[in-house]
Amino acid sequence: MKAVIITIGDEILIGQVVDTNSAWLAEELTQLGIKVHRIYSISDSREEILNALDDAGKIADLVIVTGGLGPTKDDITKQCFAEFFNTTLELDNDILNFVRSYFNQRGVEMPKANEGQALVPKGGIAIKNKNGTAPGMWYEKDKAVFISLPGVPYEMKALMEENFFPMIAEHFNTPKIFHKTVLTQGIGESSLMEIIADWENSLAEENMKLAYLPQPGMVRLRITATGNQLEELKQKVEEKVDALKAIIPEFIWGFDKQKLEEVIGSKLTECKKTLATAESCTGGYIAHLITSIGGSSSYFLGSVLSYANEVKMEQLQVSPVALQVHGAVSKQVVEQMALGVKKNLKADYAIATSGIAGPTGGSEEKPVGTVWIAIATPTKVFSEKFMFGNHRERNIRKTALQALNMLRKEIEI
Amino acid sequence: MKAVIITIGDEILIGQVVDTNSAWLAEELTQLGIKVHRIYSISDSREEILNALDDAGKIADLVIVTGGLGPTKDDITKQCFAEFFNTTLELDNDILNFVRSYFNQRGVEMPKANEGQALVPKGGIAIKNKNGTAPGMWYEKDKAVFISLPGVPYEMKALMEENFFPMIAEHFNTPKIFHKTVLTQGIGESSLMEIIADWENSLAEENMKLAYLPQPGMVRLRITATGNQLEELKQKVEEKVDALKAIIPEFIWGFDKQKLEEVIGSKLTECKKTLATAESCTGGYIAHLITSIGGSSSYFLGSVLSYANEVKMEQLQVSPVALQVHGAVSKQVVEQMALGVKKNLKADYAIATSGIAGPTGGSEEKPVGTVWIAIATPTKVFSEKFMFGNHRERNIRKTALQALNMLRKEIEI
């Protein structure tokens, strides 16, 4: 069974907005065993919308369209749906009352423009949008199902999860697909491919596929199996994953959507230990990653972000001599930062970073990209120097991932 | 002149990767006056790639293809290019030497798999990729230009910026497009539309377009003008922006790609004042935004992230009585946090946050989503309470933007 996703909006085609809806929809459809065949991004133009609907209807059983449902003039998706399905727009009183109450609940009178959002093409099913004012819609034409959704991500997601996914599951009956992604760190794509060549060939023999997905600082390996029995596919894939673990145990740190900060959170929770960070060049990014995990307050105590040297001395007791002799970006200072925050916040573990994230601040001796990372554990402190290049954002991201992974290896359960 | 972007990769169609390349390319092409007509995302399948190249070649003057150039088996873009252009792959010795030296510079022998990356379809121009091993490629067929790029974003961007954009500019001669985006805060899309209705109508009369681009906590308004003279278009748009400023002065805080943290950085730099943050529920996210701006070390001193109450008391001198009587999420505590970090770090301004980001930790009196934000200035401290909902990530993001905007209004130049 094939699906096509169409995202409508000039803002995507001029690059003002990154289309995250498609990725979310694609992932969810894949989980349902529906194969996304193509993603189109097109403009708010009648001709483009009609052409895309026509193309998509020819190749797909399910067409999901997002965007172009706002109350403003540039939004014309509904008019195009009416034209495509040879029907007319009619006022849906149920939707109108719902939109009016949406505004009333917020203590606001419904603006006149929003009345138009209760106009829907005849012949389909309109679904109320509890998070906004544009309804979702379901139509069928020549055996294909067309779903129209608002472009605002959380409105779209709620409509899919609560209404359309169950409707899709009931309407279609499809083969199953199972994916598993192995997360590796510390080895490049090409070297990895050489080491696991035989294993990779054995996948093809059993009708499984492998994809290499490199990211800054890590390579992800996605294994895909297709068939009728989800349980059987899972088992086949898990067997292959076990075989891979035996080949490259030292490089695998997690699976699927796991995040390093999650793995660390689980380990700290399990051994009932606490963490603090002292960040300079990462400016709070490590703490932000750690606290993005719900429940992190049970193991994360806090941080001292010491951008200024004075803050390093006064809040972390870094010695003025170390700063003067070795500079802020040095083994001595970063280790003192880690020990300082560990002591002051009474933590079991601490991470400290000090580096030159760029674009300015580099010198011949310490060029932009130089980063020191220290880890303090209940029994020791150690540090390592890295060169993470002169792209500020990537530098901060790489430093954070490296630091988290260094910590992960040290937490003993 | 029309362009089509094709991104190749199963990882996009199963939703494992968000396609950010298209947005970047679309934005850059738009700046060059090239209109992106469509974006396709397709799988690493021969049939799909050939179909998409064929479709795109029929409607576009310029076709930009990213992805599928890795050394591994799942990458087949080059084979498909050779087939589409009726040619064969041949070894480019120049590229081979370059790839080999890429590995040698990193002290590594070139893995055998990477030799294949020097195979390129005959009849085009292969361009060395200084950040990776897959070359960029340029082909012409039936008056359309086809460019193939690696999918790794920074490799792709460097090749476009340093090589292909200049080549495109030389090869084509196109009408100009000018966009300007007005950033507003504190008013919803529908209400905004009613207030600026006359102004919006006046745009259409002069052949300009308006788009509403809502985001959590803000609405962006994009004005687009098309013509031959870029300077003339700029002037027409700027006149309309000035007219808009007169209608809604209180809601406009910036333009185009500006970020609140940038606006704040400029204001602090101009008045030579410093900033510190004391964050609880935002967990370092505000500091991360501020330090994502290069040069922020000249006005940002640091932060104390006080997740634990003990850290609030010991590092920020929040009174135990206030914590006990009012709780951590309260006016009293958040104002003490702001004053504490301002004093300890000797800053001129301070932001403090304390709230319940969720998903757990709420109570009847203080449900998940309750957030207190305090701002301390050289002369005063004040705070406000917000309800930002129970989605952890959105809650942190909304809190940070609101806090930055509250600070922005207080910085006097």
Image (tube, coloured by chain):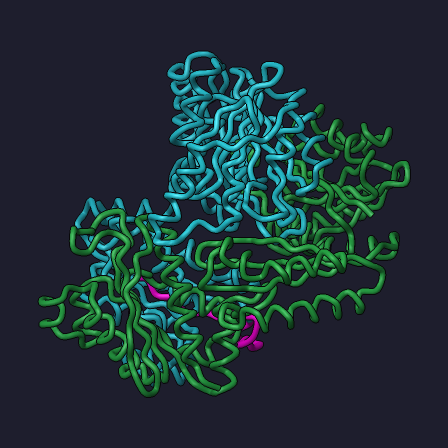
Chain colours: A cyan, B green
Q: Is residue B381 visible?
A: yes
Residue A313 lies in the magenta stretch: no
Q: Is residue B83 left or right of residue A412?
A: right
Residue B313 screen position, x and y as percent: 16, 72
> Residue A92 location in percent, x, y?
48, 31
Q: Residue at x 32, y 46 (%)?
A: A262
Is residue A249 visible to the viewer in this orientation of the structure?
Answer: no
- The reply, left or right, for residue A212 in relation to residue B146 is left
The quadrant where residue B110 appears: top right
Q: Residue A351, position in %: x, y?
A: 32, 62
Residue shown at 30% from the left, 61% from the top: B386
In the depicted structure, whether residue A305 falls above or below residue A322: above
Q: Give the magenta-colored segment's residue range.
A: A351-367
In the image, A113 versus B370, the foreground residue is A113
Residue furthest right in the image: B142
Nearest the camera: B278 or A108?
Answer: A108
